């Protein structure tokens, strides 16, 4: 299996798709950043159709958003909490499913991935099959309108999906609210929500997921220095659902 890893590095912005396709270039100091095609289903369908074809042609799994380290960081935290290997874990907007692959390789056995792009789901199924990982559930679902069966998760993980949804050219405020409502529905009370974002700062995420969620931990991400200012290009937070 080939890996086109770290297409979007955390410390340096680079993308084989060109700058305009990077989530990072959408990041802004302002709360009101511009809508983008990255917020549309058409964009992701096209992107994953291409990635699926590339995978079939040459076995390249495609992009790991925010790089491999973002996967390792999430898994390290889950393992450090001694989360049971049977815990129900949901990857929201799984893309090529590489987070699920790594979780399965670390022994987690109750994994579900969803994505609203059928091509992304097909790509994930192909990769899981190739890896011999047969008991990962993977389904086409729009997280803003999830099926009633999608519930009871102990851990929900989002890497770049809330960012994409926040870029919707439609009613973004509504989309963000729907996201929080869906999250409250699918996650067990007391369950963990681990989000990696480049579009939202820690302070903004705290506001968006309040009330309903309390911050448990900020996961360290690489820091940059520019013009005397120090900051993080990526934010990774762990929340706990509270009543
Ligand atoms: C930036 S990519 C991240 C993919 C993957 N999480 C990763 O880290 O590589 C955003 C993903 O969210 C998916 N997505 C966007 N909006 C969605 C929605 N409303 N419901 C389900 N998936 C969605 C896209 O199809 C895409 O796979």
Image (cartoon, rainbow, N blue to C red):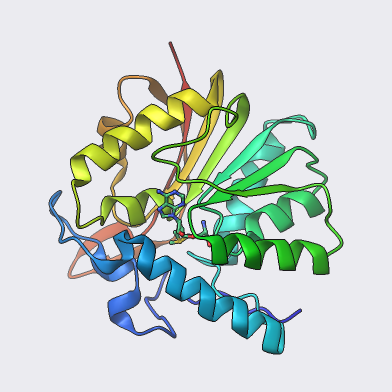
Q: Quarter of the image holding residue 149?
A: top right
Between 205 and 165, the one nearer to me in the picture: 165
Determine the residue positioned at 58% across, 27% down. Answer: 151
**Residue 10 appears in the figure:** no
Q: Is residue 5 above or below residue 32?
A: below
Between 109 and 56, the one nearer to me in the picture: 56
Determine the residue positioned at 66% across, 38% down. Answer: 78
Determine the residue positioned at 46% across, 44% down. Answer: 195
Q: Residue furthest top?
A: 243
| Residue 81: image location, x then y, percent | 67, 31
Horizontally, residue 38 falls left or right of residue 118, namely left
User: Where's the N terminus, which quadrant?
Assistant: bottom right
Determine the residue positioned at 32% across, 61% down. Answer: 40
| Residue 138: image location, x then y, percent | 66, 49
Count of residue discs? 0
**Residue 132 appears in the figure:** yes
User: Where's the C terminus, which quadrant?
Assistant: top left
Q: Is residue 55 above or below residue 139?
A: below
Q: Quarter of the image holding residue 37?
A: bottom left
Between 156 and 84, the one nearer to me in the picture: 156
Horizontally, residue 129 falls left or right of residue 150, namely right
Q: Residue furthest bottom?
A: 57
| Residue 158: image location, x then y, percent | 49, 46
| Residue 3: image location, x then y, percent | 66, 78
């Amino acid at each position: 299996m080939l890996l086109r890893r770290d297409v979007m590095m955390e410390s340096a912005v680079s993308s084989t798709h060109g700058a305009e396709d990077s989530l990072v270039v959408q990041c802004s100091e302002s709360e009101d950043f511009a809508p983008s095609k990255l917020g549309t289903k058409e964009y992701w369908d096209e992107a994953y159709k291409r990635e699926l074809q590339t995978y079939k042609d040459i076995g390249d799994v495609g992009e790991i958003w925010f790089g491999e380290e973002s996967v390792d960081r999430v898994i390290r935290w889950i393992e450090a909490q001694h989360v049971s290997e049977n815990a129900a874990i949901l990857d929201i907007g799984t893309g090529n499913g590489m987070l699920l692959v790594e979780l399965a390789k670390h022994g987690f056995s109750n994994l579900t991935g969803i994505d609203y792009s059928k091509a992304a789901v097909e790509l994930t199924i192909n990769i899981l099959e190739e890896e011999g990982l047969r008991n990962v559930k993977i389904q086409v679902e729009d997280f803003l309108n999830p099926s009633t069966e999608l519930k009871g998760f102990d851990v929900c993980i989002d890497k770049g999906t809330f960012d994409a949804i926040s870029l919707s050219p439609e009613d973004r405020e509504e989309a963000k609210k729907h996201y929080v409502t869906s999250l409250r529905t699918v996650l067990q009370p007391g369950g963990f929500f681990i989000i990696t974002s480049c579009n939202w700062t820690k302070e903004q995420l705290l506001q968006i997921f309040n009330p309903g969620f309390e911050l448990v931990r900020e996961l360290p991400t690489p820091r940059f220095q520019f013009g005397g200012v120090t900051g993080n290009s990526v934010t990774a937070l762990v929340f706990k659902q509270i009543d």
